[in-house]
Amino acid sequence: MGDGLAYIVTDRRVLVRRGRLVRQMERGDITFGRLRWNPTMPRVGDIELLIAVPFGPLSRKQRLVLRAVRDPETVFAIIRGHHPRGKTDDRDLPLVERLDPGEELVWGGRPMGPAVGWRELSVALLGLLVAVLGFAYAHAVFLVLAELERVGLPVRSWTWVLFFLPVTLSFLSILGVGAWLMWWGLVRSRVMAGETDYVLTDRRLLIRRGAVELSVERRRIVDAAVTPAGEGRYNVFLMLDAPRGRALAIGGALSRVAPPRDAVQPVLYGINDTERLLRLLLGRPEVDAS
């Protein structure tokens, strides 16, 4: 690696060295990992390793990132303690085609429903408010410009143009921000839901959303919190085994507003048959999701 940066994987640890600074993480302590594919380089990506610890006042995460790794799926398999399958470092391959040798598919699914919750609606409403304020601003200022014309300022004069251009640019900027917020809340959330896949195998749970993939070993999953998402759907928050206690990776299960999907946390959104999923995942005979 350049700039004195080096990544080392031993039988016990993962080390990142930059010059004289060395950061390390015990492989046995890793709770889950994420793989972020580079959008412009097909066989390059970042590997993010996390150790989650109990939520609450002591909530924190230990995080180690290996950036711009060549063949990241192969390296990630080695870190997890499995032999790479070969020809799996293609971000366009389905998850089921990149399982470890001998790994068997148990369940697969995708988020159901519109994928628009309170968070997305709030952002969209904020965008609408910004757009309305933009139109109100433009209306008020253009009335002032019209009054200037009435009192004798020629429309074709440079002075009038110098008034008009900043007002127009400000209006377009405000309108652009409002439109982006509405797109983020209403359109982007649906796109992200369409790009999401859930795969449960006999060894691990995989979540893929766009160019980001999360992998958590099933032995790390000790429980789950199920929260209603409306219209008979539920969000499933995984409780993970950590070196010094069990932890939810995020506290979104304790809130009415679901956490953002961008980070790709160990959360399954929009699940219909939670009883079957948790029975397969945790061996539960029955789950009350009400």
Image: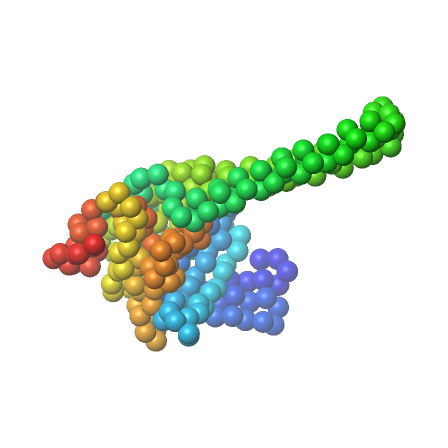
Residue drawn 80% across and 35% down? 163
Residue drawn 17% across and 50% down? 276
Q: Is residue 91 left or right of residue 158?
A: left
Q: Quadrant of residue 132?
A: top right
Horizontal and vertical percent position of residue 11: 38, 68
Q: Is residue 199 above or below residue 58?
A: above
Q: Is residue 64 above or below residue 160?
A: below
Which image quarter is the C terminus in?
Answer: bottom left
Q: Is residue 149 left or right of residue 77?
A: right
Q: Nearer the viewer, residue 165 or 269?
A: 165
Q: Quadrant of residue 211?
A: top left
Residue drawn 72% across and 36% down? 141
Horizontal and vertical percent position of residue 216: 33, 58
Horizontal and vertical percent position of residue 31: 36, 64
Indicate the colouring scheme: rainbow
Residue drawn 39% across and 71% down? 56
In this view of the protein, can residue 5 be seen by the observer?
Answer: yes
